[in-house]
Image: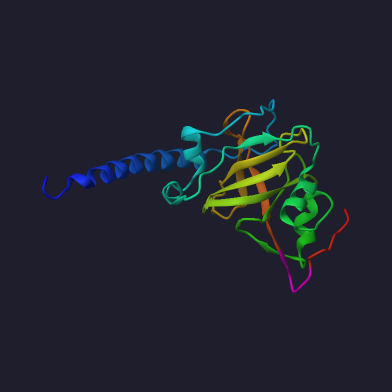
Amino acid sequence: MEALIEQRALPRLEASIRTIVRITAAVGATAALAASPAIAGEIDGAPVEETATLTGAPLMAALAPAEAVVEQSAPIEAPAVHRLSARLQCVPYAREESGVEIRGNASTWWRQARGLYVRSQKPDSGNVMVMRGYRNPGRGHVAVVRQVLSERSIIVDHANWLNSGEVTLNVPMVDVSPRNDWSQVRVWHIPTQSWGVRVYNVQGFIEPKPVNGGGAGVTHAAR
């Protein structure tokens, strides 16, 4: 046995063992999250902390499935609250950051995008995620997908999620829908350093890509 494992291979073997341990921890945390009951409601509220970050085991849980932990080439910046005095709503922020030229209430974006922009049920970098239905059907939220970590986890940037007009960057979201179709998500809550207890409905993702040459430069007013 000693002849089969050369001395120079030991560091690599130790690294592989550490990776297996990390993957096991991530799978367990993710399974627990996906199995937890869905709770509908409004956005989680808590005091905003400028220096809140995501580290350790919670970060591992955000990188689901576990393969993302091994394959991730670029470091993932810690989620943080910025521009506390920005007084922004989610719509103008998403429009500026994505280039999707739609105006009006976030709950109308999915409908407005039809025929103007490519719409998808799967996230991709640069897409606008459209959420609708918390508190009442007339309310919604839009966020910009910054990075796809795996089939069930993404990183987004958005504004006013904590209801203070702030900008929140590098926020993990996980798909907790029974069919893994991104119709329901749970969002990392920065102030409490934990997953939000509520599950939010997702209508889909708007690509900053015009349909048949339309969409670019087109704006629609609110209903």
Which one is nearer the viewer's eye here, 100 or 200?
100
In the image, taking residue 195 as reference, residue 136 lies left or right, namely right
Q: Write down the region rendered in magenta.
A: 209-214
Residue 137 in view, yes or no: no
* Residue 22, horizontal then vertical, whole percent: 38, 40
Placement of 138 over or under 49, stated as above or below: below
Which quadrant of the figure has residue 102?
Answer: bottom right
- The residue positioned 65% from the left and 41% from the top of the image is 169
Q: Identify the residue at the far bottom of this view.
A: 212
Q: Residue at x 79, y 66 (%)?
A: 215
Residue 79 visible at all? yes
Please determine whether, in this image, residue 135 is positioned above or below residue 106: above
Say which residue appears at 57% left-offset and 37% top-offset. 78
Quarter where residue 19 is shown? top left
Whether the magenta-drawn stretch holds residue 47 is answered as no
Q: Position of residue 53 (x, y in %)?
A: 58, 32
- What secondary structure predominates along the stretch shown in magenta? loop
Quadrant containing the C terminus is bottom right
**Does 213 lie within the magenta span?**
yes
Horizontal side of 127 relative to 93 (left or right) equals: left
Nearest the camera: 22 or 31? 22
